[in-house]
Image (cartoon, helix red, strand yellow):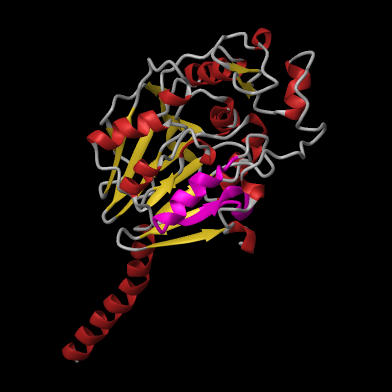
Amino acid sequence: MKKLLSFIVALVLIVGFIPFSNAEAAAKSLKVHFINVGQGDSILVQAPAGKTMLIDGGPKSAGDDVVAFLKSKGVKHLDYVVATHPDADHIGGLIDVLKTFKVKNFIDSGKAHTTETYVEMLTLIDKKNINYIVPSTLDTYKLDPNMTTRVLYANSDADDNNDASIVLKLTYNKVSFLLTGDASTEIEEQIASKYDVSATVLKAGHHGSDTSSSAKFISKVKPKVAILSYGKDNSYGHPNSAVVSRLKNVGAKIYKTATDCNITVTSDGKTYKVTNSCAKPTTTKPAPSKPATTKPSSKPTTKPATQTNFKNCTELRKVYPSGVSSSHAAYQSKMDRDKDGWACER
């Protein structure tokens, strides 16, 4: 009788532990979501042990979508929010995020900006008494005991907003992610000369612009997966065909938010899987000679994208929602009130 009882107890213990084991395995997955915010960047990191980090929030127009996406993934609070740099297409959506979720830590590039969006963001951080951090290169953050989250570059004194971009490398055992914000090729070269930039997944800098993602840098990263975050039919011509070719030349599988929508990379630290919320059409693998990926769109929402003369910023933003840089034909110095080389940013 005692033997039978011992057998039953052992059986109950074994059966009882099976669901727990499965749950434990599921909990050990790292999920990195590249959220479709149109012309901008937003990345949600869900660490294996449950902590969360949101890196950028896209433009203001994407705020509701980012909030909805976070809720759909079960996010109730954020352990870290990172503003890689103060451009509107990276911090605009963070306004709604800060209003909706409890945030423990806010990591900011420290690059001062005078736009209303940037001031509103800082005001919310102060009002909600969120721990405010300006990082230094090689700082690390404890997202998970089995992960390393390290700053490979930070420079609050950078002359250019893009070159103030915080660059992060997330490493989970054998799988790693390199997230470069809008860092230029000069910054890429600095980082690659000092640190290990090899990564399984690369979020290509500056939405696939040729101001980032040099051939030399990509050859050092050697990504298996490359993510291009940009808006469909954007007026900047993102992504640049040369960048796409460089990524293909190193064997990277390319995913684009403009055609693949929300992209999720799930990893157990040894292997990884990429899924997306849109059916992947054949056009997501364009030949290098395909002109549609290299020329600026001529399909703005309200007016022809060729228009270069505007009375004020309100009119300009109807055609170019993120404003224009000093190299753009529509740029006027009188609309660049903060004299940062970018006019009419939100």
Specify the quadrant that holds the C terminus. top right
Residue in the picture at 53% in, 37% down: 209
In this view, 74 is above or below 214:
below
Magenta-tinted stretch: 238-263
Query: Taking 73 as reference, is 82 left or right?
Result: left
In this view, 166 is above or below 316:
below
Question: In the figure, residue 130 lies in which quadrant?
Answer: top left
Residue 233, percent from left and from top: 69, 42
Question: In the figure, residue 140 lies in which quadrant?
Answer: top left
Residue in the picture at 61% in, 52% down: 261
Task: Count every numbered label the image shows and give the total.
Answer: 0
Whether residue 242 appears in magenta in the rendering, the answer is: yes
Residue in the picture at 58% in, 28% down: 99
The reply to whether residue 279 is visible in this rendering is: no
In this view, 42 is above or below 129:
below
Query: Taking 78 as reference, is 309 left or right?
Result: right
Residue 136, percent from left and from top: 29, 24
Specify the quadrant that holds the N terminus. bottom left
Whether residue 146 appears in magenta in the rendering, the answer is: no
Residue 253, percent from left and from top: 46, 58
Residue 215, percent from left and from top: 39, 44
